[in-house]
Image (tube, grey):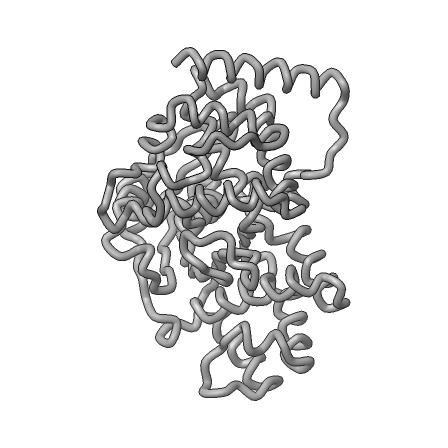
């Protein structure tokens, strides 16, 4: 039966990688791409680029090509013709960090998380935290900085804002008081006492992005041969080991109505982009999207973003942590807001009784 399924070769690469530091102002976005390319596709793209653009050193480097007018013309053609063979996950890092704050700072205190996610209270909260951070509220900036430092083992809890008697504004204070009441719950979720190298990547977006992309490419049970660009995130990674085990056994599960999982032909492989044209093409897609997100006012960017939204977004869109996708500015009815505030009060009372 397995041999009758379609087999795909998937090449994966990223742009905007800053590891578990999601607050770098000069790298606001993280993009991960997964392209399904045959040798014929790769040869066509490489030949087209070489005919129409003067490559330096013979290697396709998206971040160099996309900044030049001639390169943008080449890229636009590639996106128009081959976008259906690419899937992209992209994140506003500050919004992703707001989501991590919900994941590690609130979810562990819940008696049950099913209604929390089905009601989309997690989006409402993450959006509010994100807005406080974008507006550069001093307490929000400090709280996020300390949360990152705690996750990276660079700060003790006692020296963090979480241990102070300060009072924050709005929803941040609601969460702040819950965590301060019993901080060991959040610290345990962060594996705060774990000094293994793996513990340093709790906030990294790479592995979760890869999971979404592989789920997308294998949603009809396709068998995947996966090649990823070398990254220290994958070195001796227990997460990748679990992905290999899951994929080789084609294990699937359901998360809030969304089927997740994928089917692997063999273990995920890491290779150098210098040796794999497929990785260079994946880099071209991710670097281009990164450039366009940073330069949205350009006509080139508008045309690429239109193609991406219509053709390339990894589905479900919840794999992409972007306020524009998650509808950060959305119309909440009075009834919905009353429900959220009542739910938050219940979460608070339950958490304070722990």
Q: Relative to the observer, which residue lies in front, 225 or 258?
A: 258
**Residue at coordinates 57% horizontally, 57% vertically from top-left?**
28
Residue 300 picture quarter: bottom right
Taking 106 as reference, is 68 left or right? right
Q: Position of residue 76 (x, y in %)?
A: 67, 70
For this orientation, the residue located farthest to the front is 165
Position of the N terminus by quadrant: top left
Q: Position of residue 241 (x, y in %)?
A: 26, 46
Q: Can residue 44 be seen by looking at this rendering?
A: no
Tell me: residue 194, above or below residue 47: above
**Residue at coordinates 50% horizontally, 69% vertically from top-left?**
281
Q: Relative to the observer, which residue lies in front, 107 or 155?
A: 155
Taking 45 as reference, is 203 left or right? left
Q: Relative to the observer, which residue lies in front, 4 or 156?
A: 156
Taking 241 as reference, is 352 left or right? right
Position of the C terminus by quadrant: top left
Residue 249 picture quarter: top left
């Amino acid at each position: 039966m397995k041999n009758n399924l379609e087999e795909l070769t998937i090449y994966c690469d990223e742009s905007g990688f800053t590891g578990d530091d999601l607050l770098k102002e000069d790298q606001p976005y993280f993009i991960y791409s997964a392209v399904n390319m045959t040798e014929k596709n790769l040869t066509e793209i490489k030949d087209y680029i070489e005919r129409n653009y003067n490559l330096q050193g013979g290697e396709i480097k998206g971040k160099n090509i996309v900044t030049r007018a001639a390169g943008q013309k080449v890229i636009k053609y590639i996106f128009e013709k081959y976008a259906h063979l690419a899937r992209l996950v992209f994140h506003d890092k500050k919004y992703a960090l707001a989501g991590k704050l919900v994941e590690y700072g609130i979810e562990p205190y819940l008696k049950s998380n099913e209604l929390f996610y089905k009601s989309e209270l997690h989006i409402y909260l993450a959006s509010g935290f994100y807005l406080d951070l974008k507006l550069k509220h001093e307490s929000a900036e400090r709280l996020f900085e300390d949360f990152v430092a705690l996750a990276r083992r660079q700060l003790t809890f006692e020296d963090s804002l979480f241990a102070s008697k300060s009072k924050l504004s709005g929803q941040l204070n609601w969460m702040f008081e819950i965590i301060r009441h019993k901080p060991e719950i959040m610290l345990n979720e962060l594996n705060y006492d774990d000094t293994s190298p793996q513990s340093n990547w709790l906030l990294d977006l790479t592995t979760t992005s890869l999971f979404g992309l592989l789920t997308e490419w294998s949603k009809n049970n396709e068998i995947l041969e996966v090649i990823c660009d070398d990254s220290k995130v994958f070195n001796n990674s227990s997460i990748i080991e679990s992905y290999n085990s899951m994929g080789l056994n084609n294990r699937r599960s359901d998360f809030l109505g969304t089927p997740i999982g994928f089917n692997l032909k063999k273990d995920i492989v890491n290779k150098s982009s210098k040796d794999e044209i497929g990785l260079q093409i994946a880099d071209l897609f991710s670097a281009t999207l990164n450039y366009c997100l940073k330069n949205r006012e350009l006509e080139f960017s508008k045309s690429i973003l239109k193609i991406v939204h219509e053709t390339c977004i990894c589905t479900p869109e919840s794999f992409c942590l972007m306020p524009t996708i998650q509808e950060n500015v959305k119309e909440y009815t009075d009834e919905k807001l009353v429900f959220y505030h009542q739910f938050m009060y219940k979460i608070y009372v339950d958490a304070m009784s722990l």
